[in-house]
Image (cartoon, rainbow, N blue to C red):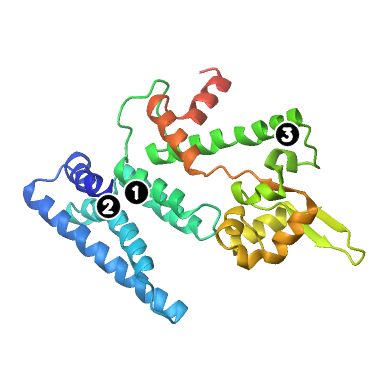
Amino acid sequence: MLAIGLPFSTFFYGNYILNLDNTHFSKFYFLIFGLAITLLVIDVLIFLIKESDIPTQKDILESSIFWGVFSIPFGAAITNWVLFNSPIINYEILAICIFCLFIYIFSMTNVMGGADICALIFIAVLIPLFPVTPTWDYSPLFPFPFVVLINALILNLFIPGIIYLINIRKGNYAPFPYMFLGFPVESQDLTNSFGFIMEDVKEMEEGQIQKRYISIRTALKNTISKKNRIYTKDLKQHPEKYTKELALFQKAGTIWISYGVPFIIPITAGLITAIIFGDILFFAMKLLAGV
């Protein structure tokens, strides 16, 4: 994707958005390359100072990919501002830069996985504008990448309702809001399921098993800190680290887990709906306003 997309993306920013001639385009190309190297070096230096350790090859590769991709819209913004002495940065270019930085900062909270972060940033840089005219309408405020994210979030809101209906149909009952967020799984099937453990299981002195639902606040705190939250995938990949927990889950019988729908699925749905229909939120607001 990057091998094909980045050269075309560079050409798109330089020729379609900035309308550069051959001389200025070569300068634009070297500016992007220089920015990518500079930002990567700065990132590595910050890592060295912060962690007091040398980053791994995987860390450097991931960092180089991000800064290499980000340098295209960032370089376009600098070219438009400095090369043409323009006091106003192109709105689309500025929005893409802000979007990429927003997603990068948001990734530090660990709410979304690395694949989701990469997908959103790649969409932002490789498809900065609507490729075709959508069936409904463009958003007057948000460029294409923001529309993809907004559509993904809106479509993702339907998943808890679907989970709730499935629980009602199967006779699974739990306090609010857990019936909207997860479902019970037999202990022997935990390693074949995808999601986070929603219950805290303890064995009392009398040998009885005590279960309580983990509060939403605690779950969010554990997600951000990456501590004390058990993912079913971890139980499958690293069972030796969770021997105590697995034994307790076996005694408990069934365990409630949160649904494990990867956000990449709503992102894909958001991308498709944005291309075909446009901005769902803007369309809904127009309907409510009677426009």
Residue 225 is left or right of residue 212, and the answer is left
Asked which quadrant contains residue 226, the reply is bottom right
The label nearer to you, 3 versus 1, is 3
Of label 3 and label 2, which has the lower sequence position? 2
Asked if one can make out residue 194 in the rendered structure from this viewpoint, the answer is no
Mark 1 lies on a secondary structure that is helix
Instruction: Point out the image quarter for the N terminus.
Output: top left
Crowd rating for badge 2 (residues with CA inside 10 Å; few <14, some 14–19, many 20+): many
- Please, is residue 94 above or below residue 105 in the view? above
Q: Nearer the viewer, residue 247 or 182?
A: 247
Of label 1 and label 2, which has the lower sequence position? 2
Q: Identify the residue at horizontal 25%, vertical 45% (top origin).
A: 5
Q: CA distance from mark 1 to mark 2?
A: 7 Å
Q: CA distance from mark 3 to mark 1?
A: 45 Å
- At label 3, which amino acid type do we have? Asn
Q: Identify the residue at horizontal 46%, vertical 77% (top origin).
A: 50
Percent position of residue 219, x then y? 68, 56
Cβ atoms at labels 1 and 2 below 8 Å apart: yes
Percent position of residue 286, x then y? 51, 23
- Please, is residue 75 above or below residue 141 in the view? below
Mark 2 lies on a secondary structure that is helix
- At label 2, which amino acid type do we have? Ala
Give the residue number, with chain letter if any, for mark 1.
94
- At label 1, which amino acid type do we have? Leu
Give the residue number, with chain letter if any, for mark 2.
77
